[in-house]
Image: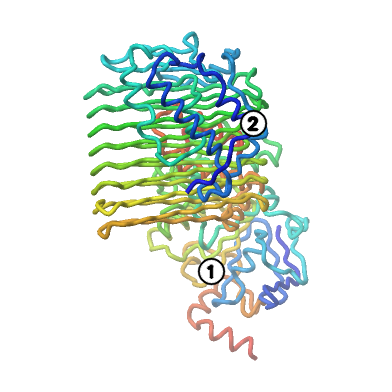
Amino acid sequence: MLKIEDLHVSVEGKEILRGINLEIGKGEVHAIMGPNGSGKSTLSYILAGRDGYNITKGRVLFNGKDLLEMSVEERAWAGVFLAFQYPVEVPGVSNIYFLKAALNGIRKFNGESELDAMDFISMVKGKMKDLDMDEKFLYRAVNEGFSGGEKKRNEVLQMSVLEPALCVMDETDSGLDIDALQIVAEGVNRLRNPERSFVLITHYQRLLDYIKPDYVHVLAHGRVVKSGGPELALELEEQGYAWVDEKVAS
Amino acid sequence: MSVTHLPNAHYAGLIAADKSELLGHDIAWLNSLREKASSEFADGGFPSPREEEWRYTNISPIEKSQFSLAAKAGAVDTEFLKDVLLDDCHHLVFVDGFYQASLSSVGELPEGIVVSAISTGLAENESLVKSLLDSVVSTEALGFINFNTALFTDGAVVSIEENTKVDKPIQLAFISSKDADLSLSNCRNLIIAKESSKATIIETYNGVEGSCYLTNVVTEVVVEPNANLSHNRLQAESLKAYHMGGVYSRLDKNAIFSQYNYTFGAVLSRAEVHAELGEASDCTMDGLYIGMDHQHIDNHTRVNHAQPHAVSNEFYKGIMGDRSRGVFQGRIIVAEDAQKTDAKMGNRNLLISDRAEVDSKPQLEIYADDVKCAHGVTVGQLDDTAIFYLRSRGADEQMAKNMLTFAFANEMVERIEFQPLRIKVLEQLLERFPQEGMKIEWL
């Protein structure tokens, strides 16, 4: 589904990603772990198409198409979804309108007709219930005045409404207490299926107790320095990132 | 200090012309008021950009266009009228500066309430008109007011009886007909909310699109002790028209006055919203202005805290696109005796084009020492992070920008309690920033 080949990215002349290679198959869950400043968030923004990054080398293929050539919205239409580390507050735009506009954009691209308003609302309300979100959030401005946990839940709600093929989740566990973490993880697990892939970007192993990855990659200094199974996350948790640094140094 | 700026031959001619056909020409006091205004206009003309209060707004296109008073009201299409009139209101309709009884429907009103055109009730309401006319407007020589006083053809007179509440809003609809090209509509509105009364007034300004005319309107408002008056104005003139509008108000002790000012139309417009605040009165001034193409929109507000313990809250938001230009000048004056004044003024502007411009100028003159005064001005652009966020969810770039621009304005629309007016303002917004698939109840 996603193939990253020798990706080099710099920001204001400073190289952040220095040759990333990753291949993510259909239905797989990959965790990318790494210390602060290792380039994790940069990678997620590159996949979503944010401005301000200079891609100096390499390519990213999404279902065989050159992802980096696509605009931000084209990626969303094609099924790429980034759950933000810091979801943006959008005062004046209600959640329900935002979701409807997003879903219609995607449906239009896929040649599908607009969802009937009633069907749409009952579908969204069902998903909100799964995430233990109060219906009043529908009519509140997107993320405005939401707590950290509410924002993350709202990201998962968007994901479950938009049903993307590839979900990139950037530090979804940060700012979540144990209850919220379980609810969010259950929401993600419900979305797992053989057609949908996940990239979980996280600093801590904590999230991976609830969302079992198929593969774990360790990112350090802009490169994948180690890949393995879920046991790698535990190893990291035990030994800390200093161990990675030593590994890079050696 | 006004600068001498003589009217050009055309307008000097209008002012000097025989006024024996004008409304109230047989009433001596009115004639002398008109004469005084005429002579002041003959000496001072329209304001020049050399005057500080007019430095951002050059009205020379109005001088060059040589507008003349319409001889009579032109025809208005039924559909057009239907679109202008708000549901659930008492309506007075003026076309090209003349009251149109056949298009108006005042309906049932509580006893003692006057809702009338000046032209139809002048004999009956003469003392009321006399007590209000020229009583609230600023005493400084202001060309457009003098021009209005000298030549007004009609307007509304509204008096809300003591201890009376008018449930339905009173809509004063000013329409420029399709025959109005190069004509001038010059109405004067006189409104008084007597002690402990409550009412809502909505002035609307509409013209047939493509038609070039001038609306020069002056509204004088008196809010007596403990009365609560809401005054709204929706300016949706033709985009080729000119609009000079003023709302001058006086708030007595404990009076509440809320002025909401929505500007969408006219190629060049200016709204003056002035309030003189009595003791412990409460004044709200909210505004929204949207400029596109080459529109020039000027909002000029003045809050004069003349007495202690009064509260004023002023908040204007503007969106300027294309090559439009917005001007906001908000002035708060706190007199020496006006202790415990609580005054707030905010102006936020969104520029959605590189070629648009905003000049925002808050002016605070504070002569008292125990007061709270806050002001803030921002001029900004759409937030890139928010645009990226919306696009990453599947909104295309234009849609994302429209959503955020709409949202910026919607904060002011949300404040409109009267649903028919709210929908009219929304329609204006949505025409400029379409929101696919949006339902009004989701806002």
What residue do we see at 23% from left, 39% from top? B254
What residue do we see at 56% from left, 50% from top? B350
Residue A162 in the image: above or below residue A243:
above
Residue B62 in the image: above or below residue B387:
above
Residue occupied by mark 2:
B9
Of the residues shown, which amino acid type is indicated by label 1?
Answer: Thr
Check the image and name the residue furthest to the bottom: A250
Q: Position of residue B70 (x, y in %)?
A: 59, 18
Mark 1 belongs to chain: A
Residue occupied by mark 1:
A202
Mark 2 belongs to chain: B
Of tags 2 and 1, the one toward the viewer is 2
Q: Is residue A119 visible?
A: no
SS at badge 1: strand
Q: In the image, B135: left or right of B224?
A: right
- Crowd class of label 1 (few under 14; some 14 to 19; many from 20; radius 10 Å): many
| Quadrant hosting residue A128 | top left
Of the residues shown, which amino acid type is indicated by label 2?
Answer: Ala
What residue do we see at 43% from left, 16% from top? B24
